Image: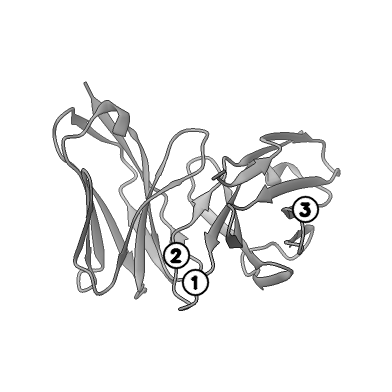
Amino acid sequence: SQKIEQNSEALNIQEGKTATLTCNYTNYSPAYLQWYRQDPGRGPVFLLLIRENEKEKRKERLKVTFDTTLKQSLFHITASQPADSATYLCALGGYIPTFGRGTSLIVHP
Amino acid sequence: NAGVMQNPRHLVRRRGQEARLRCSPMKGHSHVYWYRQLPEEGLKFMVYLQKENIIDESGMPKERFSAEFPKEGPSILRIQQVVRGDSAAYFCASSPEDREGTSYEQYFGPGTRLTVT
């Protein structure tokens, strides 16, 4: 069955550093991969979408890579800030994306 | 441009009652999705609707749950005879219609937190 893996342990980093989150998947060949941010008690917020023929996508301090051979996506936040602290979800698929459980990021001042 | 709206934000029901959750998609969006999220778990897809049509309900429990998206008005997720296990956050998301039939990002509402006592 399809499986999406995101690190269940929180990632703690110092302000100003680059945060890197990983999304691995198996038994799946998605044409699209998306990243969302979710704050406690709120709905997810769309951040970036990358297509299978794109290796990398950037938006301001965010960068996403998509390696269909490794079946992995990396999500980077450069110059991280305490306000970036949240849970980050990856989602794979077409019309009905499948969401991972998310990784919590904590940026310490 | 208002975002996706959901109401109520919090809903408390006793076992056996009915719960009705409403979702108004973003203006111009014709696709609506419902998800359920339990603490420490990921978003679980329930149902995908377009106006007056259920496109995919593969994530919906076979009994007690139903959804609709009428021509006029919000989408409704209805849970009959609620049980404690239905307690969760229910999120609605919408996406625009895409003529090429490709996937689009989804825009989520704030969710409805259902508590069954």
- Identify the residue under disc 3: B78
Q: Can you name the residue that lies furthest to the front here?
A: B1
Labels 2, 1: front one = 1
Sequence-wise, the earlier of marks 2 and 1 is 1
- In this view, the residue in front, B28 or A44, is B28
Q: CA distance from mark 2 to mark 1?
A: 8 Å
Residue B22: x and y in percent read 72, 47
Q: Secondary structure at mark 1?
A: loop
Check residue B98 in the rendering and tell me which mark sits there, or answer none: 1
Give the chain of mark 3: B
How packed mark 2 is, by other alpha carbons closer than 10 Å (few <14, some 14-19, many 20 or more), is some
Check residue B104 in the rendering and tell me which mark sits there, or answer none: 2
Above or below — where is B103 with respect to A74?
Answer: below
Q: CA distance from mark 3 to mark 1?
A: 28 Å
Kind of residue at badge 1: Asp
A107 lies left or right of A87: left
Labels 3, 1: front one = 1
Residue B105: x and y in percent read 44, 59
How packed mark 1 is, by other alpha carbons closer than 10 Å (few <14, some 14-19, many 20 or more), is few
Kind of residue at badge 2: Tyr
Give the chain of mark 2: B
Residue A30: x and y in percent read 36, 72
Q: Secondary structure at mark 3?
A: strand
